[in-house]
Image (cartoon, rainbow, N blue to C red):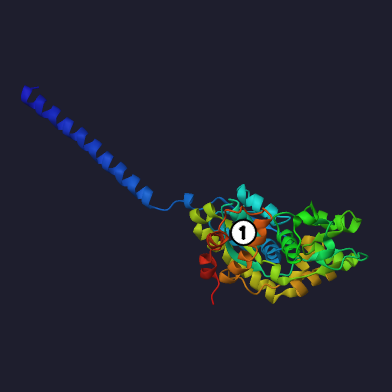
Amino acid sequence: MPQFFQSTRRKFLSLFALGVITVGSLNACSNQQTSSSTPSSANAPQVVRLDYAYYNPVSLVLKKKGWLEEELQKSNIKVEWVLSQGSNKALEFLNSSSIDFGSTSGASALVGKANGNPIKSIYIYSKPEWTALVVPANSSIQSVADLKGKRIAATRGTDPFIFLLRALNEAGLSDKDVEIVPLQHADGKAALEKGDVDAWAGLDPFMAQTEVEKNSKLFYRNPQFISQGFLNVRESFAQQYPNQVLQVLTAYEKARQWAIANPDELQKIVIEEAKLSEPVAQKQLKERTNLTEPVIGDEQKQVITAAGTVLKSSGIIPESINVTEVVNTLIDPQYVNKVVKP
């Protein structure tokens, strides 16, 4: 082959190879840009984990009906349920990322947030009178002042525990004037009935149970000291998966409205899940539970901020904490305002 044609052929092949490489590089860049700008399945979790609790009737309805599973299944997202035996357990699960959504009292959520638990309170599942100070039927204790020097069962980090602290403070006493026996709620009820403690900071439905079945007395009641039922979400989950937060709240709202419209069926679900008698469930649900106010906001801020002074003096919240700032960062109404229409 003449030298001229050999030279021309080499140049052509070099230019062709360069063109292939350039086009391939451009295609790769184009694919990379498309991939980075297009949402993928990584933007949704594989599973959403929630707690259910006997003190949260709406959670029992939602778990029983399976409405959240139906909705999330459309996106191939699974649902897992974990039992919380108290606000303290729900906060532990949230802090360890064992659950994404947890049921607590408002004051308990404040304690958790103040001590570094990265949560947001986004919904009110109940506004109950779910705690009081309880003594056996034959007890001589008639007032909070009579508790001085007595043994009192309470679950630390929960609304009944905080209720006890506020009641003692109102009577001029503190936790140093009594012996607080740390027990989970069900164990506190059992200790009261066995006579192992003199009093118990109770929680429904266990409180209603001992009241109905053992004639235990609720000798001190004060709804003003009771914070409401907060549904909390892990901050990192809310930041990463805001759409799933809205899906969970939408399902919660469906369950809450169903519970209000079907009180007898709600009672059956609570009886079945919590293994209660009908009179106990009636006392818990019909006498002491209000499900009509799901929106979280200024009212809840005022309720839990009021507990801050006592929580500080008892060492439950560090003295250096600005309670108002913590409350403002804890309560986040943006999600419920999108789900619940005025």
Residue shown at the point (39%, 52%) measured from the top left: 38
Q: Position of residue 122 (x, y in %)?
A: 57, 63
Residue shown at the point (55%, 68%) measured from the top left: 336
Under mark 1, the amino acid is: Leu
Quadrant of the frame with the N terminus: top left
Along the line of sight, the residue nearer the viewer: 341 or 200: 200
- Where on the picture, by quarter, is residue 280? bottom right
Marks counted in the figure total 1
Q: Where is residue 201 in the image (x, y as percent from the top left)?
A: 79, 61
Residue 154 in sight in this render: no
- Where on the picture, by quarter, is residue 302? bottom right
Crowding near the residue tagged with mark 1, few <14, some 14–19, many ≥20 C-alpha atoms within 10 Å:
many
Q: Measured along the vertical axis of the image, is residue 46 above or below residue 304?
A: above
Q: Position of residue 151 (x, y in %)?
A: 84, 55
Residue 173 in sight in this render: yes
Seen as rendered, the residue at the extreme right is 138
Question: What residue is shown with label 1?
Answer: 110
Q: Where is residue 190 in the image (x, y as percent from the top left)?
A: 86, 56
Along the line of sight, the residue nearer the viewer: 37 or 179: 179
Query: Which type of secondary structure does the marked residue at label 1 adopt?
Result: helix
Would residue 264 be found to the left or right of residue 5 on screen?
A: right
